[in-house]
Amino acid sequence: MAKALKKAAPTGEVTKKAEIKKTADNKAATKKALTKNPSTKKDGGKKSARKKATPKKLKAPSAIIPQISVAPPPPRAIGASAAVLDRLWNVIESRKGADPEVSHSARLLSRGTPKVAQKFGEEAVECVIEATRGNPEGVVAESADVLYHLLVMWVDAGIQPGDVWAELQRREGVSGIAEKASRARSLPQELNLGTSKIP
């Protein structure tokens, strides 16, 4: 039959008819394959999108990674807060017996109370200088130094932060002027001066 077509029709027509027949045969074969196996597609038999969307069951993390028991870190305040002073005091307190070659806090404490107090005074003066210059960034940096050296002085003197917090709480709601006046009256009595004026 193909020979008869070749004789009857020009070559171009035969080629077109053959291509059309080949394309129709391919479509029919693909449709038949999809009907028999819905998990295959034209794209090389890959699984359908519906099958791909189903998530694979993963192994539990404990089966993959061995569980390590780690103690939770100590609670911290969210963001920057005054709680850092208590933590810093604890660190300085823990350095009391440490090697002065390794710890700055241990080095300060090993020099004795006069040096600890002197260092605090130097840092306070530097903070005052930055304030008089009108340098807020400098005041912040020097204030951090002042607070650190104040805590070193507390540790050296055996003062707990809670002692200072309690004194601040005692003064809360009391006028600063009234509080200063009460201290001015009590000081001469403590020193047995017999006068209410500060010498």
Image: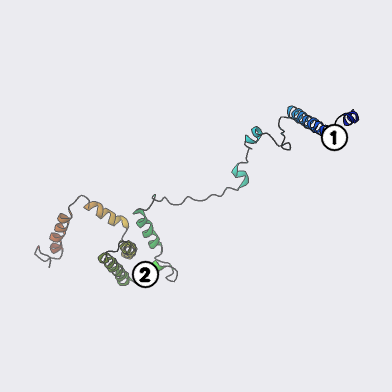
What's the residue at 85%, 34% (across, down)? 11
Q: Nearer the viewer, residue 48 or 71?
A: 48
The label on residue 128 is none
Binning the other alpha carbons within 10 Å of mark 2 as few (below 14), some (14 to 19) or many (20 upward) gives many
Q: Position of residue 136 (x, y in %)?
A: 30, 61
Q: Amino acid at mark 2?
A: Leu
Binning the other alpha carbons within 10 Å of mark 1 as few (below 14), some (14 to 19) or many (20 upward) gives few
Report how far apart the C-alphas of labels 1 and 2 lie in the structure: 105 Å
Q: Amino acid at mark 1?
A: Thr
Tags 1 and 2 touching, CB below 8 Å: no
The picture quadrant where one finds residue 141 is: bottom left
Q: Nearer the viewer, residue 160 or 147?
A: 147
Q: Earlier in the sequence, mark 1 or mark 2?
A: 1
Q: Secondary structure at mark 1?
A: helix
Which residue is labeled 1 in the image?
11
Whether 17 is drawn above or below 77: the answer is above
Q: Position of residue 26 (x, y in %)?
A: 78, 32
Q: Secondary structure at mark 2?
A: helix
Whether 65 is drawn above or below 24: the answer is below
Q: Nearer the viewer, residue 123 or 96?
A: 123
Which residue is labeled 2 in the image?
108
**The N terminus, quarter of image:** top right
What's the residue at 29%, 66% (across, down)? 130
**Mark in the foreground, 1 or 2:** 1
Name the side, left or right, on which 1 lies relative to 124. Answer: right
